[in-house]
Amino acid sequence: MPFDIGEGRLQRADGAARVTFARRGAATVLAELAQRVPCRVLFPVVDEGDPVQAVLLTTSGGLTGGDHVAVAAAVGAEACATVTTLAAEKLYRSTGADCRIHVDLSVAEGGWLEWLPQETIMFDGARLRRRVEARVAASGRLLAAEIMMFGRAASGETLNRGLLQDGWAVRRDDRLLWLDAIRLDGDLAAARRRPFGFGNAAGYGTVIYVGPDAEAAADRVRPHDVSVINGVMVVRVLDEDGARLRGAVGDVITRLRSGMRGLPARLPRVWAL
């Protein structure tokens, strides 16, 4: 007898992860952890000089239309932590529904949070709605990055159709500092080729640094394309080669974490796995 999934309905993922770090004496420690499949959080032993680290993974191996993931990461006053991902996030072709990803970041007074996921790879036909929201206290600092790849170059696949809706909102306390969004729907190949589009880029990278010393941070990353808006430093990266794009984003990250916090000028170890 064939397996009955009920009128063609497919089970979809509704995952979540929340991790909070706090300062205890001279150390930053885990204060709160909640997770729901397919999201999982690992806490590896870090290299000397690096802050405590949370590594996110999706046990389903990727996301597709109809899946929903919510991630929240926070550091308390004077705490310092890195949140990254075990591997690139794969977004598979959708049969029509959208994949929704929401990221919530919070930095208290004197805190330092690094949001450094590896790249997101959109398969042809994928449909993504992603939003990153950050709240940073007046003396807090946030270093965040995202890399979006258009298709699977190694497999000869490009991103021709689908939905890409990607947005950022950054607030200092309750004041909106920076709002940024992109929406491409339908014929993504044509949309990317439009004037002021992405040309032949394999994808794009965004790195932001939020802090009272944002102007000094901009000096650290030049000659990369950098701007400072309301205390938010923004770097945009485009490249026709995915490996170079990843490398350029990594260069910006290492310059900022070493120059603005005195951390080792290296990426999380999982980026090299």
Image: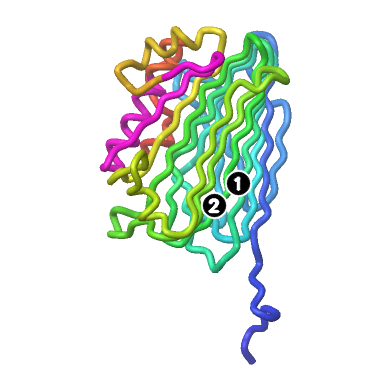
Q: Amino acid at mark 2?
A: Leu
Q: Position of residue 62 (x, y in %)?
A: 51, 55
| Residue 83 higher or lower than 194, as above or below | above
Using a 10 Å C-alpha cutoff, classify the residue at mark 2 as few (fewer than 14 neighbours), some (14 to 19) or many (20 or more).
many
Disc 2: which residue = 128
Please indicate whether residue 198 sits to the left or right of residue 209 in the image: left
Check if mark 2's residue and mark 1's residue have beta carbons within 8 Å.
yes
Q: Residues within 10 Å of mark 1 (few under 14, many from 20)?
A: some
| Depth order, front residue of 180/206 | 180
Closer mark to the observer between disc 2 and disc 1:
2
| Image x and y of residue 64, in percent | 55, 59
In the image, is residue 131 above or below residue 69? above
Would you identify the image quadrant in which residue 271 lies? top left
To which residue does mark 1 refer? 101
| Disc nearer the start of the sequence (2/1) | 1
The residue range painted magenta reads 227-254
Instruction: Please say if 101 is above or below 43.
Output: below
User: Residue at left 54%, top 32%?
Assistant: 180
Quarter that holds the N terminus: bottom right
Residue placed at 35% from the left, 54% from the top?
Answer: 152
